[in-house]
Image (cartoon, grey):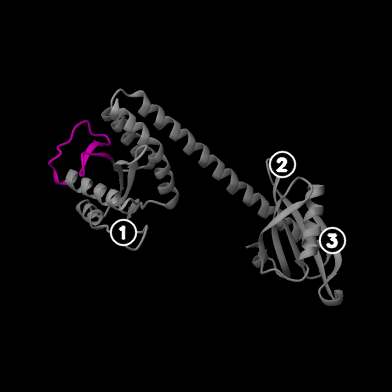
């Protein structure tokens, strides 16, 4: 992105530091590997060793060293520690222009640091929620109470209109809990459609997402389509619930149609289901 933004860049590279004094493998090279890469590596090493931006003027590369260039590199820091080193080869220019380019590279580092910190915060939040959910499951005396607690927490955390858990009773799945509902009639059309969606995901052993994300082309999604149409085109995510050795049921999450399930949310839900499954199975056996 920065190599395209800054005019006159010949080649650029982003390196992962092998240790505090030398760069390691290249994470990305723009536009491709070519003449002058050894100069980029040397400059990246200098920036990492000095832990600051480096400028090398009046350098030559290419056949018989006939081409002139300038080299700039700076470490990208997170919590004052280098997580990467960026190095670029640019066409010759004044010292003031060199400093301006170096400053742009450093600003890019601040942008990357912000992204990493946001990701860390999101991971910590997900970890805290997983711990809270597991504590709630293990703290209840029955699988029914644990299931109710689980769907309520999932609905609140992911902003769902409804979350349901169903357990296998032989081949069919029977709904065990619906978020924010102490009781429900198992004969209603809603319950039957949710159970059908759960069976659809369990039979295919895949996470089913409606409407946009397809797990595989052959996945049958008729029950999910019918459930969505029954409730004004809702967004639906159904995850098979695995116990220690086999699938014991499923979790279905429903949102309004204008709030589809993003890939990050689906991944977190799958992770939580993998944790909750064996715990709920243990409660059933107890």
Q: Residue 233 appears at what percent x and percent y?
A: 26, 55
Left or right: where 26 falls relative to 193: right
Give residue 86's quadrant in the image.
bottom right
Q: Residues within 10 Å of mark 2 (few under 14, many from 20)?
A: few
- Asked if the residues shown at circle 2 and circle 3 are in contact, with their CB atoms under 8 angstroms apart, the answer is no
Decide: is 268 above or below 2.
above
Quadrant holding the N terminus: bottom right
In reply to whether residue 171 is colored magenta, the answer given is: yes
At 45% across and 49% down in the image, what residue appears?
264
Task: Count residues near mark 1 (Cα–Cα under 10 Å), then give few for <14, some for 14-19, many for 20+.
Answer: some
Residue 178 appears left or right of 75: left
Q: Are marks 3 and 1 in contact (CB under 8 Å)?
A: no
Question: Residue 67 sits in which quadrant?
Answer: bottom right
User: Nearest the camera: 231 or 265?
Assistant: 265
- Per the rendered image, the range of residues in magenta is 164-189
Q: Secondary structure at mark 2?
A: loop
Residue beneath label 2, please?
Answer: 80
Q: Earlier in the sequence, mark 3 or mark 1?
A: 3
Q: Is residue 1 left or right of residue 72?
A: left
Between marks 2 and 1 in the image, the one whose residue lies nearer the viewer: 1
Looking at the image, which residue is at 63% across and 51% down? 111
Q: Position of residue 277 (x, y in %)?
A: 35, 37
Residue at image mark 3: 56
Q: Residue at x 67, y 64 (%)?
A: 29
Of label 2 and label 3, which has the lower sequence position? 3
Residue topped by disc 1? 219
Which label sits in the foreground, 3 or 1?
1
């Amino acid at each position: 992105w920065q190599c395209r933004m800054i005019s006159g860049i010949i080649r650029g590279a982003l390196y992962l530091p092998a240790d505090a004094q030398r760069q390691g493998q290249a994470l990305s090279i723009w536009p491709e590997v070519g003449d002058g890469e050894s100069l980029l590596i040397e400059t990246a090493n200098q920036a990492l060793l000095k832990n600051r931006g480096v400028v090398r003027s009046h350098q030559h590369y290419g056949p018989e060293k006939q081409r002139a260039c300038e080299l700039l590199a700076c470490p990208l820091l997170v919590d004052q520690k280098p997580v990467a080193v960026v190095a670029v080869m640019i066409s010759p220019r004044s010292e003031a222009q060199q400093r301006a380019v170096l400053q742009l590279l450093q600003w890019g580092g601040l942008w990357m640091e912000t992204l990493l910190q946001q990701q860390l915060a999101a991971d910590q939040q997900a970890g805290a929620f997983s711990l809270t959910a597991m504590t709630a499951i293990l703290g209840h005396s029955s699988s029914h109470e644990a299931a109710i607690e689980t769907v309520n927490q999932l609905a609140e955390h992911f902003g769902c209109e409804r979350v349901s858990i169903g357990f296998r009773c032989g081949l069919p799945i029977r709904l065990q809990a619906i978020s924010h509902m102490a009781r429900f009639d198992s004969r209603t059309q809603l319950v039957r459609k949710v159970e059908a969606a759960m069976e659809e995901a369990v039979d295919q052993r895949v996470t089913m997402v409606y409407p946009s994300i397809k797990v595989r082309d052959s996945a049958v999604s008729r029950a999910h389509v019918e459930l969505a149409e029954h409730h004004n085109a809702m967004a639906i995510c159904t995850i098979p619930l695995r116990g220690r050795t086999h699938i014991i049921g499923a979790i279905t999450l429903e949102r309004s149609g204008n709030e589809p399930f993003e890939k990050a949310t689906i991944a977190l839900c799958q992770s939580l289901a993998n944790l909750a499954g064996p715990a709920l199975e243990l409660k059933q056996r107890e």
